[in-house]
Structure formats: C-alpha cells, structure tokens
Image (tube, helix red, strand yellow):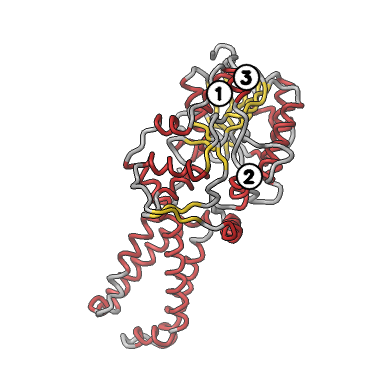
Amino acid sequence: MAEKIGRVLVLGAYGFIGAEVVRTLQASGFAVTGLGRSVEQAARVLPGVPFVEGNLLQLPKPEDWTPLLLGMDAVVNCAGVLQDMAPGELEAVHHSAIAALAAACADRGTKVVQVSAAGAGPGAATEFMCSKGRGDAALRASGAAAWILRPGLVIGQGAFGGTRLLRMLAAVPPVQPVALGQAPVQCTGMADLPAAVVAALGGKLPQGTYDLVEDQVNTLEEVLTETRKWLGFAPARMALRVPDWLLPPIAACADALGRLGWRSPMRSTAIAEIRSGVCGDPQPYRAAMGVGLAPLQAIYHSLPAGREQRLDARMALMMPIAVAVLCLFWLASGLIGLWQLEAAANVLLAKGWGSFPAKTSVVFWSLADIALGLAILWRPWAARACLGMAGVSLFYMLAASVFTPQMWADPLGPLVKVLPGIVLALITHQLLQER
C-alpha cells in the first residue's frame, strides 16, 4: 500500500479528524508530515510526527504551496472552520486555499484527498457547507487525482464540536435536554474515516466523491440517547425539550462569544446544520468498497467508555458555568469595591493608613478585579486570567493577614471564602486546556 504513495502531507494534522488520519496513515506504512498553525500544539497531540507550520489563510495561490509539496506524493486535507472568526475566513480556508492547492497538485501530479462534509454544495443551508462545496468543485475541476470524502456526524473516542455537545447534554442529571430532536442524522465512526483515506491512497478506492455515512438515518434524539447509554449515565427521568423559538437567541449569544474566541457548538451555523439534517448517500462508497460503514450502535460498541469519558463529559458541561461564575464574581468584587469605596478604605484607615493611599489601594485592586473578570471572557487570555485570579487572591490573603488579621475571625469568613475561589480558578484553568 505504502509503496505506491510514500510521503503524505496532512493539513489540520492535530485536529479531531486530522490526528486520527495521521496515526492511521503511519500505522499503514506511510511517511506523514503534518501542517497546521501551532508547532507546540502539534508536538503535544502528535509527538514525534514531522510538522510544518502553516496557515491556509496565507496560502491563496498555487505557488504558495510549491515549497510545502516538495517530496510529497499526496495531500490529505482535514482542515476546516465552522464559522467566520474574521470576514472571509470560510471562503479562504474552504475554497481559495483548496483551489490553489488543487492547481499546484495537478501541476506536480500530487494526489489529493479532501475531507469535506455530507451535504456540502451550492444549495446548502449555510455558508460553511456552501464554501466546502466550492472547494470540492474546484478540486474536481483542477484535473488533480482527487478523492472527496464527505462524513456525517463523526463519532470517535475523543470529542469535538457536535460530538462534544452530545456528551455535554448526555451528562445533565437527571433530565435530558433535547433540541431539534427529530432532525435526521447519519453518523460516521472515526475508524471508518481514516480507513477510507488509506483505501484511497492505497489504490483500493477509485477517485470520486463519497458520502461516508451509515445506512440508517437516526433522529438527533436517538443519537443523544445512544450517547448517554454509551457513557454509562443513568437513564434520564424525563426529556426537557427546548422549544425552537429559544434556539435563535441561544445561537446569537454563542455567535457573540465566538467573536471573543469561544468556539461554542451552539453557534448559528451548527444549529442550522442540525436543523437541515446531517445526511448523505452511503451507496456509492458501498458499491466501490463492497461494504458499508458501521451503524451508530456498532460505532459506540467498538469504543471503550469508562470513568475518563464520563468525567470529560461532566467537566465539559461545567466549564462554561465555571467561567461564568468567575467572571461575575470578579466583576462584582471590583464594582462593589468602587461603589463602597469609603467603607472599604475605612478598614485601612483604622490601621493607620492615610486617606489617599487607602482609597488609591481600594481603587487599584477594584480595577484589577474588573480587569480579570473581563479578561476571562476573551478566550486567548482566559487560562492566564484564571492564574491571575489565583495569584491576586493569594496576595489578598497575605496582605490581609499582615494588615487586617482580624478578618480571619470575621463571622462572615471573608478570607476563608477566598480559598474556594482560588481552587475554582485553578480547576477552570485546567478545564480550559483544549488538547
């Protein structure tokens, strides 16, 4: 298999799908090089795998790909974004960069495997699917040897995006929240997707476009029920059905958080995709390979689930709550300090401080609290903000122990209550680690 195609460049190599594709290709005897935006993240996810730093937003022309394709026999594209984080990002990542890659590969005779999405095309309901479809069309028109693989809802041992949301919802006790429960969904086992990539590069799968989906069409509620069962959570006592009218404001909030760097699975694109259904035609792949993909129950049966998966689901559910609590706590702490400036300064005045340094100290630390409460909302800063909260809290405790030690004996326990806040900040810092 690897004699025909030896060296493979995988785009989006350390992502949810890309990492499994890399591992499977390596296990099948291919020499794999990854490409993505972060060398450090690649080293954590795929230790020992050769890696090239690159951003599809900066590769809009065929000549931009030339140095990356040197010595490569094939390219597998696993990169993608759900929704624009900047104007034109979807078009650039899904279409412009792929059209340039296709042209460069056609000139060099390099094969291309494109991991697209079931339903991608010009008539799709979202720009995500439309831009994916334009990239697929550009690849087909380029003349390069190409395979376009279009998975449905991908389910693997790890979780990201839609599968992470399923596990979060499955972890809610004792009810089961359900939205768009009757939406049709066809799933794709993670093992089947990289296997199709290997089949394409190994000469077993003819060139073409294939929907990689199970034969059976499930409802979203059925998928959620199977997910809860697989995780080993107790059956829900009742289903809490979220009305459709509530989804647009939820999506609007998730989109607003997206502008702050949070990649919520509840963004408007994700909801629109679920509403329109995640479906494809499994027959072309079955005809080409002589066998179809594993159904939902078989997918979950093949994946071990234990305490770590249940804990991950619970912690994924708690992470946004923890961030919200820390944000509100630190904002309230700072605003109350400014509002009660005189009362707060009097505590220091009673210890012999002058009026100006006492009030200046209260204002400074109140503004510091507000800054930390706002910083945790900006995703790139959130983890560091948690460490800042823990550090500032420790400073408060030490300073209070020196200047106002009687506060330890206060019946309301203002200093004792700082300790749980430090622990919450440190736990949230760990929850914010994506990979």
**Upstream in sequence: badge 2 or badge 1:** 1
User: Which percent across, then down, holds residue 331?
Assistant: 47, 71
User: Which percent across, then down, holds residue 273?
Assistant: 61, 45
Q: Secondary structure at mark 3?
A: loop
Q: Residues at badges 2 and 1 in contact (C-beta under 8 Å)? A: no
Q: Choose between 385 and 412: the one closer to the eye.
A: 412
Q: Residue at x 39, y 50 (%)?
A: 171
> Quick check: 56 left or right of 331?
right
Q: Choose between 68 and 270: the one closer to the eye.
A: 270
| Residue denoted by label 3 | 73
What amino acid does circle 2 point to? Ser
What amino acid does circle 3 point to? Asp
Q: Secondary structure at mark 1?
A: helix
What amino acid does circle 1 point to? Ala
Q: Residue at x 33, y 87 (%)?
A: 352
- Check disc 1: other Cα within 10 Å, few if <14, some if 14-19, many if 20+: many
> Distance of mark 3 from mark 2, alpha carbons?
37 Å
Q: Which mark is drawn over residue 276?
A: 2
